[in-house]
Image: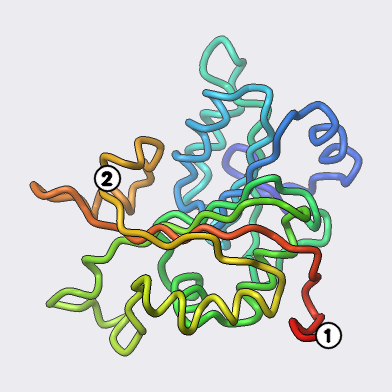
Amino acid sequence: MQVVQGKRLAELPAWTLGELRRRAVRVIVDVGTGDARAAYRLAKAHPDWLVIGIDPAWQRMAPTSVRGSRKPARGGTPNLVLVNASIEAVPADLHNLADEVLVLMPWGKLLRGIAHGERDVCAGLRAVATPGASLHVIVGTSIWRDPVPLEIRGLPELTSCYVDRVLAGRLAAVGWQVTMSELITGADTPGLSSSWARRLGSATPETMIHIAAVATTLRPGECADR
């Protein structure tokens, strides 16, 4: 499995990840971690957790990796692992690992996969989760307001009604049971601090939709009605 170590990529042996998992009281997987600053802050605040950030654009994670590689007394986070991968092709080493899966302000393929409930993305999210793990997806609603970015034109808007009528069934098909969808503001998400989230900010607090789900015993590849 390729991970970011400082300014370069390196292979992380499965036994090393296993040892980190053994020492952790909780495992958090941050999917589409971007610059990984939010993951870093989470790891620093909870040194007994294992925090894993996943993103295919590894260069963006490099500055955070450099910071995290310092000694803990100087801000280092030995409990932070940054993985160079996309969730639709998630490494097998990460399967059945997470107690909690986070998708904060996704963009690009990840956002499209969430919005459409695409099987490869949703099954990838389920693959990293243990049965009973929680999933939290937070998406800013202002991206659907004029002028709508070219990258998301035609993308269905994530509303509670759309989640209930469309997305919940697609998530259930790969082992996620939606438990909640609600509108929240930045004040409700003090841990949300990625660069993308800050770029969405304005004088008015950003309104976001929060989708929560729990991993069932259904595994990716099975049918929901089997």
Q: Which residue is mark 1?
A: 226
- Ranked by sequence position, the earlier of labels 2 and 1 is 2
> Furthest residue to the right?
15
Q: Is residue 205 above or below residue 55?
A: above
- Quadrant into which the N terminus falls: bottom right
Badge 2 density bin: few <14, some 14–19, many ≥20, Cα 10 Å: some
Q: Residue at x 61, y 27 (%)?
A: 69
Q: Is residue 170 left or right of residue 123?
A: left
Of residue 175 and residue 32, the one placed in the foreground of this image is 175
Name the spot of residue 30 as percent of width and height, x first: 57, 50
Q: Is residue 139 above or below residue 52?
A: below
Name the spot of residue 89 as percent of width and height, x first: 70, 71
Residue 18 quadrant: top right
Q: Is residue 200 left or right of residue 223?
A: left
Q: Is residue 38 left or right of residue 15?
A: left
Q: Which residue is mark 2?
A: 186
Name the spot of residue 82 as percent of width and height, x first: 63, 45
Badge 1 density bin: few <14, some 14–19, many ≥20, Cα 10 Å: few
